[in-house]
Amino acid sequence: MFKFRKLALAAGIAALALSTGAHAEGKKIGLAVANLQAEFFNMIKQSVETYGKEKGYQVIIVDAKGDATTQVNQIQDLLTQKIDALIYIPAGATAASVPVKAARAAKVPVVNVDRNADGAPGDTFIHGESVKATTELAEWICKQSGGKGNAVVIHGQKGTSPEVDRMKGWTAGLAKCPDIKITQNQFTERWAADEGNKIAQDMLQRDPTINIIFGQADGIALGAAQAVKLAKPANKVWVVGYDGDVGGLKAVQSGSLDATVTQPTFTMGRMAVDAVTDLLAGKKPPADQPMDGVLTTKENVEKFLKNHP
Protein backbone atom coordinates (compact mmCIF):
# COMPACT_ATOMS: atom_id res chain seq x y z
CA MET A 1 0.00 0.00 0.00
CA PHE A 2 2.81 2.42 0.94
CA LYS A 3 4.56 1.70 -2.36
CA PHE A 4 1.30 2.35 -4.26
CA ARG A 5 0.84 5.70 -2.49
CA LYS A 6 4.39 6.70 -3.39
CA LEU A 7 3.74 5.81 -7.02
CA ALA A 8 0.43 7.68 -7.00
CA LEU A 9 2.12 10.74 -5.48
CA ALA A 10 4.89 10.60 -8.09
CA ALA A 11 2.29 10.31 -10.85
CA GLY A 12 0.43 13.30 -9.43
CA ILE A 13 3.57 15.40 -9.33
CA ALA A 14 4.40 14.40 -12.91
CA ALA A 15 0.88 15.28 -14.04
CA LEU A 16 1.14 18.67 -12.34
CA ALA A 17 4.47 19.31 -14.02
CA LEU A 18 3.00 18.41 -17.39
CA SER A 19 -0.04 20.60 -16.85
CA THR A 20 2.04 23.63 -15.88
CA GLY A 21 4.24 23.22 -18.96
CA ALA A 22 1.50 22.20 -21.37
CA HIS A 23 1.01 25.72 -22.68
CA ALA A 24 4.44 25.64 -24.33
CA GLU A 25 4.91 21.99 -25.27
CA GLY A 26 4.80 21.70 -29.05
CA LYS A 27 4.05 25.39 -29.55
CA LYS A 28 6.00 27.36 -32.16
CA ILE A 29 7.36 30.86 -31.74
CA GLY A 30 8.44 32.71 -34.84
CA LEU A 31 11.25 35.17 -34.13
CA ALA A 32 11.64 37.73 -36.92
CA VAL A 33 14.88 39.66 -36.37
CA ALA A 34 15.78 42.90 -38.17
CA ASN A 35 19.45 42.13 -38.75
CA LEU A 36 21.59 39.52 -37.00
CA GLN A 37 24.76 41.31 -38.10
CA ALA A 38 24.00 43.71 -35.24
CA GLU A 39 25.26 42.39 -31.90
CA PHE A 40 22.28 43.85 -30.04
CA PHE A 41 19.81 41.81 -32.10
CA ASN A 42 22.00 38.74 -31.78
CA MET A 43 21.82 39.04 -28.00
CA ILE A 44 18.02 39.21 -28.12
CA LYS A 45 17.99 36.20 -30.44
CA GLN A 46 20.21 34.21 -28.06
CA SER A 47 17.98 35.10 -25.12
CA VAL A 48 14.71 34.19 -26.86
CA GLU A 49 16.15 30.99 -28.27
CA THR A 50 17.65 29.75 -24.99
CA TYR A 51 14.79 30.76 -22.71
CA GLY A 52 12.15 29.68 -25.21
CA LYS A 53 13.62 26.19 -25.40
CA GLU A 54 13.78 26.05 -21.60
CA LYS A 55 10.06 26.76 -21.56
CA GLY A 56 9.34 24.04 -24.12
CA TYR A 57 8.81 26.15 -27.23
CA GLN A 58 10.12 25.48 -30.70
CA VAL A 59 11.73 28.74 -31.82
CA ILE A 60 11.97 29.41 -35.57
CA ILE A 61 14.31 32.30 -36.38
CA VAL A 62 14.43 34.40 -39.55
CA ASP A 63 16.86 37.24 -40.30
CA ALA A 64 15.77 40.07 -42.61
CA LYS A 65 19.34 41.41 -42.89
CA GLY A 66 17.95 44.92 -42.69
CA ASP A 67 15.51 44.59 -45.59
CA ALA A 68 11.82 45.29 -44.91
CA THR A 69 10.53 43.50 -48.02
CA THR A 70 12.50 40.38 -47.14
CA GLN A 71 11.05 40.48 -43.64
CA VAL A 72 7.46 40.70 -44.89
CA ASN A 73 8.03 37.58 -47.00
CA GLN A 74 9.76 35.76 -44.13
CA ILE A 75 6.86 36.42 -41.75
CA GLN A 76 4.33 35.28 -44.36
CA ASP A 77 6.32 32.03 -44.53
CA LEU A 78 6.33 31.73 -40.73
CA LEU A 79 2.54 32.08 -40.73
CA THR A 80 2.24 29.27 -43.29
CA GLN A 81 4.28 27.14 -40.88
CA LYS A 82 1.48 27.64 -38.34
CA ILE A 83 3.48 29.48 -35.69
CA ASP A 84 1.52 30.07 -32.48
CA ALA A 85 3.05 33.48 -31.75
CA LEU A 86 5.35 36.02 -33.39
CA ILE A 87 8.17 37.94 -31.72
CA TYR A 88 8.85 40.77 -34.11
CA ILE A 89 11.73 43.26 -34.47
CA PRO A 90 10.87 45.36 -37.56
CA ALA A 91 13.65 45.71 -40.12
CA GLY A 92 12.69 49.33 -40.73
CA ALA A 93 9.83 51.79 -40.65
CA THR A 94 8.76 50.97 -44.23
CA ALA A 95 6.05 48.28 -44.32
CA ALA A 96 6.52 47.54 -40.61
CA SER A 97 2.77 47.29 -40.08
CA VAL A 98 2.23 44.67 -42.82
CA PRO A 99 3.45 41.62 -40.80
CA VAL A 100 1.38 42.66 -37.77
CA LYS A 101 -1.78 42.88 -39.85
CA ALA A 102 -1.01 39.51 -41.46
CA ALA A 103 -0.47 37.91 -38.05
CA ARG A 104 -3.70 39.38 -36.72
CA ALA A 105 -5.58 37.98 -39.73
CA ALA A 106 -4.14 34.56 -38.85
CA LYS A 107 -5.05 35.07 -35.17
CA VAL A 108 -1.38 34.92 -34.16
CA PRO A 109 -0.39 37.17 -31.23
CA VAL A 110 2.49 39.59 -31.79
CA VAL A 111 5.17 40.70 -29.33
CA ASN A 112 7.24 43.63 -30.55
CA VAL A 113 10.78 44.05 -29.20
CA ASP A 114 12.92 47.21 -29.51
CA ARG A 115 10.83 48.65 -32.37
CA ASN A 116 7.09 49.01 -32.78
CA ALA A 117 5.10 49.19 -36.00
CA ASP A 118 3.57 52.62 -36.51
CA GLY A 119 -0.20 52.32 -36.93
CA ALA A 120 -0.28 48.60 -36.15
CA PRO A 121 1.37 47.93 -32.78
CA GLY A 122 1.84 44.44 -31.44
CA ASP A 123 -0.08 43.04 -28.47
CA THR A 124 2.77 44.28 -26.29
CA PHE A 125 5.89 46.35 -26.91
CA ILE A 126 9.09 45.57 -24.95
CA HIS A 127 11.75 48.21 -25.43
CA GLY A 128 14.42 50.40 -23.92
CA GLU A 129 13.29 53.77 -22.57
CA SER A 130 15.40 55.62 -25.11
CA VAL A 131 14.30 59.21 -24.50
CA LYS A 132 15.16 59.22 -20.80
CA ALA A 133 18.46 57.37 -21.21
CA THR A 134 19.65 59.44 -24.15
CA THR A 135 18.79 62.65 -22.32
CA GLU A 136 21.05 61.50 -19.49
CA LEU A 137 23.78 60.58 -21.98
CA ALA A 138 23.63 64.06 -23.56
CA GLU A 139 23.72 65.76 -20.15
CA TRP A 140 26.80 63.70 -19.28
CA ILE A 141 28.61 64.63 -22.50
CA CYS A 142 27.71 68.26 -21.88
CA LYS A 143 29.58 68.20 -18.58
CA GLN A 144 32.51 66.19 -19.87
CA SER A 145 33.09 68.44 -22.89
CA GLY A 146 32.87 71.66 -20.92
CA GLY A 147 29.53 72.55 -22.46
CA LYS A 148 30.92 73.87 -25.73
CA GLY A 149 31.49 72.56 -29.23
CA ASN A 150 30.06 71.08 -32.40
CA ALA A 151 28.16 67.82 -32.09
CA VAL A 152 27.13 65.48 -34.89
CA VAL A 153 24.64 62.62 -34.86
CA ILE A 154 24.89 59.42 -36.91
CA HIS A 155 21.35 58.06 -36.81
CA GLY A 156 20.00 54.58 -37.24
CA GLN A 157 17.28 53.81 -39.78
CA LYS A 158 15.12 56.86 -40.33
CA GLY A 159 11.68 56.73 -38.73
CA THR A 160 12.23 53.63 -36.57
CA SER A 161 11.10 54.11 -32.97
CA PRO A 162 14.63 53.89 -31.46
CA GLU A 163 15.98 56.41 -33.99
CA VAL A 164 13.19 58.88 -33.27
CA ASP A 165 13.29 58.49 -29.47
CA ARG A 166 17.08 58.67 -29.21
CA MET A 167 17.12 61.90 -31.16
CA LYS A 168 14.39 63.33 -28.89
CA GLY A 169 16.44 62.49 -25.80
CA TRP A 170 19.72 63.74 -27.27
CA THR A 171 18.16 67.05 -28.28
CA ALA A 172 16.53 67.47 -24.87
CA GLY A 173 19.77 66.76 -23.03
CA LEU A 174 21.85 69.15 -25.14
CA ALA A 175 19.23 71.90 -24.75
CA LYS A 176 20.78 72.51 -21.32
CA CYS A 177 24.07 73.32 -23.05
CA PRO A 178 23.25 76.07 -25.57
CA ASP A 179 26.92 76.40 -26.54
CA ILE A 180 26.90 72.88 -28.01
CA LYS A 181 25.43 72.98 -31.50
CA ILE A 182 24.26 69.95 -33.50
CA THR A 183 25.88 70.77 -36.81
CA GLN A 184 25.41 67.59 -38.86
CA ASN A 185 22.95 64.68 -39.01
CA GLN A 186 23.10 61.61 -41.22
CA PHE A 187 21.15 58.36 -41.32
CA THR A 188 22.32 54.77 -41.73
CA GLU A 189 20.40 51.80 -43.12
CA ARG A 190 21.89 49.01 -41.00
CA TRP A 191 23.05 50.68 -37.75
CA ALA A 192 26.46 49.22 -38.67
CA ALA A 193 30.13 49.99 -37.99
CA ASP A 194 31.10 50.36 -41.65
CA GLU A 195 28.36 52.94 -42.14
CA GLY A 196 29.38 54.79 -38.97
CA ASN A 197 33.00 54.80 -40.09
CA LYS A 198 32.31 56.19 -43.57
CA ILE A 199 29.85 58.83 -42.36
CA ALA A 200 32.15 59.97 -39.54
CA GLN A 201 35.08 60.27 -41.94
CA ASP A 202 33.01 62.50 -44.23
CA MET A 203 31.76 64.60 -41.32
CA LEU A 204 35.27 65.14 -39.94
CA GLN A 205 36.54 66.14 -43.36
CA ARG A 206 33.76 68.69 -43.71
CA ASP A 207 34.35 70.07 -40.23
CA PRO A 208 37.59 69.29 -38.34
CA THR A 209 36.29 71.23 -35.31
CA ILE A 210 33.76 68.51 -34.41
CA ASN A 211 34.29 67.45 -30.80
CA ILE A 212 31.24 65.25 -30.09
CA ILE A 213 29.93 62.29 -32.10
CA PHE A 214 26.80 60.42 -31.06
CA GLY A 215 26.31 57.09 -32.83
CA GLN A 216 22.76 55.95 -32.13
CA ALA A 217 23.96 52.34 -31.69
CA ASP A 218 27.24 50.92 -30.46
CA GLY A 219 28.06 49.50 -33.89
CA ILE A 220 27.74 52.96 -35.45
CA ALA A 221 29.77 54.53 -32.63
CA LEU A 222 32.55 51.95 -32.94
CA GLY A 223 32.90 52.76 -36.63
CA ALA A 224 32.95 56.48 -35.83
CA ALA A 225 35.62 55.96 -33.16
CA GLN A 226 37.83 54.24 -35.73
CA ALA A 227 37.35 57.20 -38.08
CA VAL A 228 38.43 59.60 -35.33
CA LYS A 229 41.51 57.49 -34.66
CA LEU A 230 42.50 57.60 -38.33
CA ALA A 231 41.79 61.33 -38.65
CA LYS A 232 44.07 62.21 -35.70
CA PRO A 233 42.25 65.48 -34.91
CA ALA A 234 44.03 68.20 -32.95
CA ASN A 235 41.21 68.37 -30.39
CA LYS A 236 39.61 65.71 -28.22
CA VAL A 237 36.59 64.13 -29.92
CA TRP A 238 34.08 62.54 -27.56
CA VAL A 239 32.38 59.48 -29.07
CA VAL A 240 29.36 57.89 -27.42
CA GLY A 241 27.05 55.06 -28.43
CA TYR A 242 23.94 53.25 -27.27
CA ASP A 243 22.88 49.65 -26.46
CA GLY A 244 25.62 48.25 -24.25
CA ASP A 245 26.61 45.51 -26.69
CA VAL A 246 29.57 43.46 -25.48
CA GLY A 247 31.74 45.08 -28.16
CA GLY A 248 30.59 48.52 -27.07
CA LEU A 249 31.23 47.75 -23.41
CA LYS A 250 34.75 46.54 -24.17
CA ALA A 251 35.36 49.74 -26.13
CA VAL A 252 34.25 51.82 -23.13
CA GLN A 253 36.54 49.75 -20.93
CA SER A 254 39.51 50.38 -23.26
CA GLY A 255 38.67 54.04 -23.83
CA SER A 256 37.79 53.69 -27.54
CA LEU A 257 34.28 54.86 -26.67
CA ASP A 258 33.70 57.43 -23.95
CA ALA A 259 30.27 56.15 -22.92
CA THR A 260 27.25 54.13 -23.96
CA VAL A 261 23.85 53.23 -22.54
CA THR A 262 23.45 49.60 -21.47
CA GLN A 263 20.07 48.09 -22.20
CA PRO A 264 18.81 44.97 -20.36
CA THR A 265 19.03 43.06 -23.63
CA PHE A 266 18.86 39.49 -22.34
CA THR A 267 16.02 40.43 -19.98
CA MET A 268 14.05 41.87 -22.90
CA GLY A 269 14.37 38.56 -24.75
CA ARG A 270 13.12 36.59 -21.75
CA MET A 271 10.27 39.06 -21.26
CA ALA A 272 9.22 38.50 -24.86
CA VAL A 273 8.93 34.75 -24.26
CA ASP A 274 6.97 35.34 -21.04
CA ALA A 275 4.66 37.68 -22.94
CA VAL A 276 4.04 34.91 -25.49
CA THR A 277 3.18 32.52 -22.66
CA ASP A 278 0.68 35.01 -21.21
CA LEU A 279 -0.94 35.69 -24.58
CA LEU A 280 -1.31 31.99 -25.39
CA ALA A 281 -2.88 31.48 -21.96
CA GLY A 282 -5.44 34.20 -22.68
CA LYS A 283 -3.79 36.75 -20.42
CA LYS A 284 -3.15 40.31 -21.60
CA PRO A 285 0.32 41.74 -20.84
CA PRO A 286 0.77 45.52 -20.61
CA ALA A 287 0.63 47.18 -24.03
CA ASP A 288 3.85 49.07 -23.29
CA GLN A 289 6.77 47.61 -21.31
CA PRO A 290 9.66 50.12 -21.23
CA MET A 291 12.99 49.13 -19.70
CA ASP A 292 15.47 51.63 -18.30
CA GLY A 293 18.91 51.90 -19.86
CA VAL A 294 21.94 52.74 -17.71
CA LEU A 295 24.56 55.35 -18.58
CA THR A 296 27.78 53.35 -18.81
CA THR A 297 31.29 54.79 -18.48
CA LYS A 298 34.65 53.47 -17.33
CA GLU A 299 33.41 53.85 -13.74
CA ASN A 300 30.68 51.21 -13.99
CA VAL A 301 31.37 49.20 -17.16
CA GLU A 302 32.99 46.21 -15.39
CA LYS A 303 29.76 45.04 -13.78
CA PHE A 304 28.00 44.87 -17.15
CA LEU A 305 30.86 42.95 -18.73
CA LYS A 306 30.74 40.44 -15.87
CA ASN A 307 26.97 40.08 -15.82
CA HIS A 308 25.04 41.60 -18.70
CA PRO A 309 21.42 42.22 -17.76
Image (cartoon, helix red, strand yellow):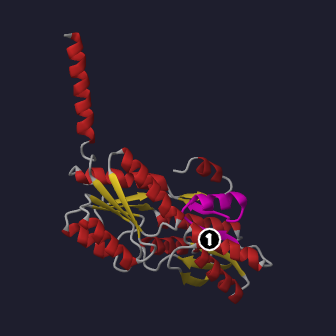
Image height check: is 219 above or below 269? below
Q: Residue at x 28, y 47 (%)?
A: 24
Image height check: is 131 above or below 11? below
Near-viewer residue (76 or 223): 76
Q: Residue at x 35, y 59 (%)?
A: 60
The image quadrant of residue 202 is bottom right
- The N terminus appears in which quarter of the rendering? top left
Q: Is residue 246 magenta?
A: yes
**Relative side of 211 to 91, left or right:** right
Q: Percent position (x, y) of residue 32?
A: 37, 65
- Which segment is the magenta one? 238-261
User: Which residue position is annotated with label 1?
Assistant: 221
Q: Is residue 155 magenta?
A: no
Element under disc 1: helix
**Relative side of 302 to 9, left or right:** right
**Residue that sits furthest to the top in the current view:** 1
Q: Residue at x 20, y 66 (%)?
A: 106
Residue 121 visible somewhere in the drawing: no
Near-viewer residue (218 or 51): 51
Residue 101 visible somewhere in the drawing: yes
The image quadrant of residue 110 is bottom left
**Residue that sits furthest to the right in the current view:** 234
Q: Percent position (x, y) of residue 158?
A: 46, 80
The amino acid marked with disc number 1 is Ala
Near-viewer residue (201 or 121): 201
**Residue that sits furthest to the bottom in the current view:** 206
- Residues packed near mark 1 inside 10 Å, few (<14), some (14 to 19) or many (20 plus): many
